[in-house]
Image: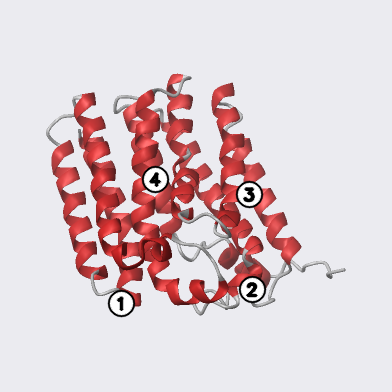
Amino acid sequence: MDAPADISPHRLILYARLVRLDKPIGSLLLLWPTLSALWLASNGQPDPLLVLIFTLGTVLMRSAGCAMNDFADKDFDRHVKRTADRPLTSGQIHAWEAVAVAVVLALLSFLLILPLNLLTKQLSVLAVLVAGSYPYFKRFFALPQAYLGIAFGFGIPMAYAAVQDQVPAEAWMLLLANIFWALAYDTEYAMVDRDDDLKIGLRTSAITFGRHDVLAVMLCYAISLALITAIGLRHGLSHGFLPGMLVAAGIAVYHWVLIRDRDRMQCFAAFRHNNWLGAAVFTGIALG
């Protein structure tokens, strides 16, 4: 049996690395769509308490998802150059610690939504199930990045539920847009690890798309931005909306410049730069 973990400053740093507090890009990729949904659902006037709850909940659930992902992938990550030094993979913490951290963070996230309506609580249970099962989809599903888009976008129907006590068709359309966005940015991410993933038998969109990977990324960006633009126009958003969408489209074109030669570091840079694309979309919606 593993020895109990000491709660020393060094171990807390390892836990912080486990949940990627040193790499906030993942939290931001969840946060921008969630905030966009809150603004749309409330016609631009979200309750500040809801903004606080969903912001904190997004960070907590992303962190819990990272811990569970590392637990599920502990036997694969050691074969991938980029992930070999993660705390769990490198043996610096025990597997049960990763599970315990994930459970504690998920419970804290659930406590945050206790003041909200029943529908939001019910959707939160689905969100946990989707997030917890995502790591295993890489074993057999050809496009696990699409499933990631559902996991990363589940704050969208939850935001509508919290504001309107219903999940209208618009929310699912916004979730679909998020799925295509996740396919775009996580394919860029998967292009970094493609050689390692092929060796260990994992399935990724970069492998599935093959030599059409760059084209697929750009098509996913185009579909995502087109869906969001249609939602904004349907809402009758003001002139501030379209400039935000044009900036987002310009950022997507910049990503094509980065990934067209399939250089690993440039693909990783494109993935990280998606924070600015999400920020541009949210800013356009908020200004609109």
| Nearest to the observer: residue 146 or residue 47 | 146
Q: Which residue is mark 3?
A: 105
Between marks 1 and 4, how big is the CA–CA gap? Answer: 24 Å
Examine the image and state in which quarter residue 16 appears: bottom right
Earlier-in-chain disc, 1 versus 4: 4
Q: Which residue is mark 4?
A: 179
Between marks 2 and 1, how big is the CA–CA gap? Answer: 26 Å
Crowding near the residue tagged with mark 1, few <14, some 14–19, many ≥20 C-alpha atoms within 10 Å? few
Q: Which numbered disc covers residue 263?
A: 1
Task: Tell me the kind of residue under disc 1.
Answer: Asp
Q: Which residue is mark 2?
A: 89
Crowding near the residue tagged with mark 4, few <14, some 14–19, many ≥20 C-alpha atoms within 10 Å? many
Earlier-in-chain disc, 2 versus 3: 2
Earlier-in-chain disc, 2 versus 4: 2
Q: Name the image quarter holding the N terminus.
A: bottom right
Q: Nearer the viewer, mark 2 or mark 4?
A: 4
Q: State left or right for residue 206 relative to residue 108.
A: left
Task: Tell me the kind of residue under disc 4.
Answer: Ile
Q: State left or right for residue 11 relative to residue 55.
A: right
Q: Name the image quarter holding the C terminus.
A: top left
Between marks 2 and 3, how big is the CA–CA gap? Answer: 20 Å
Q: Which numbered disc covers residue 10?
A: none
Between marks 2 and 4, how big is the CA–CA gap? Answer: 29 Å
